[in-house]
Amino acid sequence: MKKVLVTGGAGYIGSTLVQLLLDKGYFVRVLDNLSFGGEAIVDLFNNPNFEFIKGDIRDVEIQRRAIQGMDAVAHLAGIVGDPACAIDKDLTNAVNLEASYDTYRLSEEMGVKRFVFASTCSTYGKMADPEAFLTETGDLSPVSLYAETKVQFEQFLVEQPRTNVCKPVRLRFSTVYGLSRRPRFDLTVNEFTKELALKRELVIFGEQFWRPYCHVLDLARSIVFAIEAEESKVAWDVFNVGSTNENYTKQMLVNEIVKVIPDAVIKYVKRDEDPRDYRVNCDKIEKVLGFKIQMTVPDGIKQIKQSVEEGFFNNPDDSKYKNI
Ligand SMILES: NC(=O)c1ccc[n+]([C@@H]2O[C@H](COP(=O)([O-])OP(=O)(O)OC[C@H]3O[C@@H](n4cnc5c(N)ncnc54)[C@H](O)[C@@H]3O)[C@@H](O)[C@H]2O)c1
């Protein structure tokens, strides 16, 4: 694998991935419609191994141009997150499903060998057994349009003929946090830390509910692992991405933040139900690919706290740091 197309490469995870790939000597092409601008990757124009195509993945001809000559495709472009997907159902289906089907079909047609899909652990929905940690064989019960499109696209990949040259790998990402070239402050760890670093009162709804978390750098690393792995280890397979030790309740996240912001003011609002209450087992990716996280939630909290407190962002509340 020498040449990689990253769709959505100007985004939060994509921009981190592009840098990692360039550092490893890959030729990297990005296809992105720059929904949130391109500042995250503008300096990469100085790298001769970087190429950018501005376009929408709903445009088949643009996709054809972008996929031409690539060895691997990391498919990250999409409408991301429950609130963003809920705004326009038709657009969400057009981008996250129809256009994404084209991304895979064209990849197969044009001889791409590896197709890595950014799925999500939120495809699992609520845990049936509150004590259990969900593995890749767990039932999928999406509770939002966003997660539903991820489940459907995964299913589409699974149904492709095994004779295809383009081998798909599905990565189910934990909820992401941490700093990236495109910072996001609408993600739980980042938002909680930002609000408290700005000395605001934080309101927590349902502090007892679980989620798995993973740093943006580690998610990007997992994509590189999926691209570089032997075909027999990843083809047609699915991996939870993160660490089994990095499942937290919101209360546990707050406890970590309070260690570095002791004067934090927090108000709790009781909630008895959260349809996205789950813990995830990420042992398979470590066992099969040797992938281990390098960052933990406390590391992410420290970097968000420092960057916000020391004024790296003129306006951390700017809408460009959110997906809606
Ligand atoms: N952030 C998370 O917690 C998380 C968790 C699991 C999975 N994922 C998945 O990882 C991928 C990347 O997520 P992210 O957090 O970097 O999101 P992001 O919104 O920062 O990045 C998405 C990128 O896709 C681009 N894009 C959107 N629609 C497009 C279109 N029609 N044509 C071309 N480009 C388009 C956007 O401009 C943006 O740069 C997504 O597929 C997302 O579903 C994210």
Image (tube, helix red, strand yellow):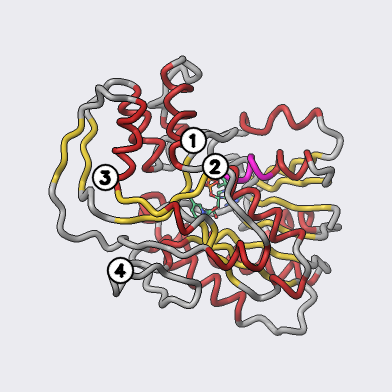
- Of labels 2 and 4, earlier in sequence is 4
Q: Which residue is mark 3?
A: 251
> Residue 272: x and y, percent?
15, 58
Identify the residue at horizontal 25%, vertical 26% (top origin): 264
The quadrant in which the C terminus is found is top left
Circles 4 and 3 in contact, beta carbons < 8 Å: no
Q: Earlier in the sequence, mark 1 or mark 3?
A: 3
Three-letter amino acid code of the residue under disc 1: Asp
Residue 266 is left or right of residue 175, and the answer is left
Q: Please tell me which of labels 1 and 4 falls first in the chain.
A: 4
Closer-to-camera residue (280/116): 280
| Number of the label disc, if any, that sits on residue 131 | 4
Q: Which residue is mark 2?
A: 295
Q: For the N terminus, which image quadrant? A: bottom right
Asked if the residue at tag 1 contacts the one at tag 2, i.e. Cβ–Cβ closer than 8 Å, the answer is yes
Q: CA distance from mark 4 to mark 3?
A: 17 Å
Q: Position of residue 91 (x, y in %)?
A: 47, 57
The magenta segment is 12-17
Res 230 quadrant in image: bottom right
Q: Position of residue 303 (x, y in %)?
A: 49, 29
Task: Quadrant for residue 188, please give it.
Answer: top left
